[in-house]
Amino acid sequence: MARSKVAVSSVDLPSTSPPYTPSDASPIEFTSAETKSTKGPKLSARTDYTRWRLLDEAGRQTWHYLETDEAVKAWPQSIADKWHLNMSTGLPDLPTPKTPLDSVKNSLEFFQHLQLPPGNWGCEYGGPMFLLPGVIISWYVTETPIPDHIATEMKNYLFARAHPVDGGWGLHIEGESTVFGTAMNYTALRILGVSEEDPVLIKARGTLHKMGGAIAGPHWAKFWLSVLGICQWEIVNPIPPEFWLLPDWFPVSPWRWWVHTRMVFLGSGFIWSQRWTTKETPLIRQLRQELFAEPYELIDWIGNRNTIYKIDNYHPKCWLLNVINWILVNIWIPYFRTNWVIKKAEDWTWNLIQMEDKNTDYSDIAPVSMPMNFVACYIREGPDAFSVQRHRDRMADYLWVKGEGMLVNGTNGVQCWDTAFAIQAVMDAGLAEDAKWRPMLTRALEFLEDQQMRENVDDQAICYRQQRKGGWAFSNKVQGYAVSDCISEALKAVLLLQRTPGYPTLLEDQRIYDAIDTLLTYQHAWSGGCASYEPARQGEWLELLNAAEVFGRIMVEYDYPECTTAVVTALSLFSKHYPDYRATDIKTFKAKAVGYIRNAQFPDGSWYGSWGICFTYAAMFALESLASIGEYYENSEHSRKGCEFLVSKQRADGGWSESYRSCETMTYVEHPTGSQVVMTAWAIIGLLEAGYPHRGPIEKGLKLIMSRQQPNGEWLQEAIEGVFNKSCMISYPNYKFIFPIKALGMYARKYGDSPLQ
């Protein structure tokens, strides 16, 4: 992949202003740094939740707080708004379900009210506890005013998610306290205006000091605290942007890294190169005294570059990375990192940042790198630049309000992903032709049609982006990163509905072909498995350079049973309707992919899941993949062992219950709270896909699911469902509708809709 490293002369920027929203409903005040008030936000106990509204503009979801009674009257609160805010929806109790389809219909009676006007479903995508601090710190250092209602609800969320015993914060909402979570969220609360004498912060500070103070934080914590000037830059291991000047053939060139990692390295490297620190304020001086267990003036910054608390140190740096860092600090930086090299590296990384901003309309790939790019734009172009203002505007896309307060989502939503699954769940229940649900499904189809990405990004080769034409993103087309399973699930949903009587054909054949062409690029030739964002560009050995410390499997792409299954099943459905298009390529692809599924199975019959928890989630997909080529319990050892693994984990009450610890340890761990509705549905779906012949375990699991259903048709939130990079968990609240509907519906279609025995 030869690409020129010459600077791009210019990057075309949008010429229009950010889209209009009512001034009294703006999620963030876009006041310039020169004219903003020097006062911080005014905190209250709680905002008036009847004034919050979720606006969905073609998949762009932003929350708005209505300041006036006139605005409240003009924009009524929806049922979806109320549900997300944990307010009473006013929806009635429904007849007690007697059969699986009764339960499905009750759920749909509720779930239909959560569909948003463009046709998608939205929800919280929280869980990680390091996202909110990055956003708040970026606001502080760019002198972005934080509105009172935003600050109040962010404070409430962080208070609600403090550890109930020690008062700290973890890597994610179910994790034990870490220096990363505690130092970052403590800092965020102080920026929001919480006093250091608040009991919540007194308790958190004591826990932080017991863990060694902020000097024992991982790399990202030290980075952000150095941007603030709380730490000195000497404590941060090098992030040299000149790595981007390495030729593309070089084995560790950053374009070979996993896309999220290289995007974080891009923005943070630009900032590190300048050793940029915000101006000193009284708050910064106070935090220097609060965050450390020893006097600030006595801290050995260089000597603590590799100091890290044991719980934070999930992936310890290897000897090779430590040697590289030593060489960079003691040889490269003082003797060879000349001003010419620095300027060339910063200019090139700045151009890459501009291309990322342009291709995502400043939303960027995710809210880890986005605040970094925001700060980089502020440094390079000044407080009143369009890039800075647009980043401020786009930050609203990541904010989500719920009953606990305001958090930062892991992406700018789950729009395409959850909508595709919702369509398939109704299809699997055999209800797509029911006139009652046709309007809901038609709107969902229209949303997916609108969100298909019709072209590749500009400068695709120069900015190292994967082909995306015909694909779908996880969230929306503005974010614009196609993912193999997101393309696959959306494509299946479109094909299923467009081939169902009563639904329009919105995607013509060529658009379907475009999706297939892109899907066929995701397979690894050496394994047959499929990656997520792009095929792996280097081997797993690159994890030797994993500097994040808190995550595993972060440096390169991997094979995933979930992604591989999604692609295989999409190709199978496509070939059913288009048997002649790239038939040989598809046949070869599927054979290799299913071969990978077989090879990835553990001796106990399980598969390791990377995007959901964990072995239960992966088994559902893997068994579906095998079934798609005719391998079932009765004729396949792999399918049979997978089923036996699942059944062996069923609990006495009929449910399944797997802890996030399974993801960390790669061994099955029971969740301490007991059976979970979502995991029970995953297991049942896997068994049904595999043709498991014994109805008893399946019916027992379904009875548990039905017993947990509320009178209004919903299920309540239980344990966290998702994961990324082995150690960080993330929430998928719509799963408690989608997968129970699918499991109950599949059973009813297979065995008939009779009361369960």
Image: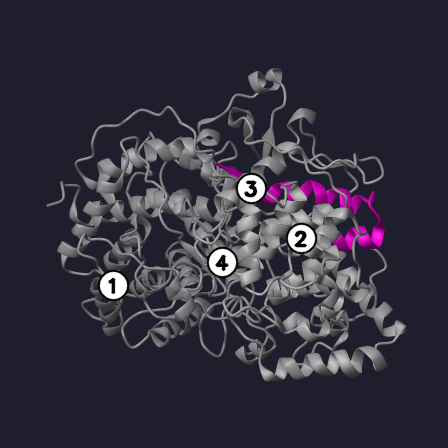
Q: Amino acid at mark 3?
A: Asp
Estimate the spatial distance between the alpha carbons at disc 3 and disc 2, rounded to whole Å: 25 Å
Which residue is at the front of the view, 550 or 360?
550
Whether the magenta-drawn stretch holds residue 375 is answered as: yes
Q: Which residues are magenta?
A: 374-402
- Rounded to the nearest angstrom, the CA distance separating label 1 from label 3 is 38 Å
Task: Pick whichever, 304 or 488, lies toward us.
Answer: 304
Mark 3 and mark 4 lie on one chain; the one further toward the N terminus is 4
Mark positioned earlier in the residue sequence (4 or 2): 4
Badge 2: residue crowd in 10 Å (few <14, some 14–19, many ≥20)? many
Residue mark closest to the camera, 4 vs 2:
4
Q: Identify the amino acid type marked 1.
A: Leu
Residue that label 1 marks: 646
Amino acid type, residue under disc 2 in the picture: Met
**Residue drawn at point x = 34 percent, y = 70 percent:** 667
In the image, what residue occupies the spot 73% across and 38% down? 145
**Quarter of the figure with the N terminus:** bottom right
Q: Secondary structure at mark 1?
A: helix
Quickly name the residue at label 4.
177
Query: Mark 4 packing: few (<14 Cα in 10 Å), some, or many (20+)?
Result: many
> Split into 4 quadrants, where in the image is the C terminus?
top left
**Residue at (32, 40) in percent of width and height:** 715
- Whole-percent x and y of residue 25? 64, 27
* Residue 716 horizontal side relative to residue 362, left or right: left
Q: CA distance from mark 1 to mark 2?
A: 40 Å
Q: Which residue is mark 3?
A: 450
Circle number at residue 370: 2
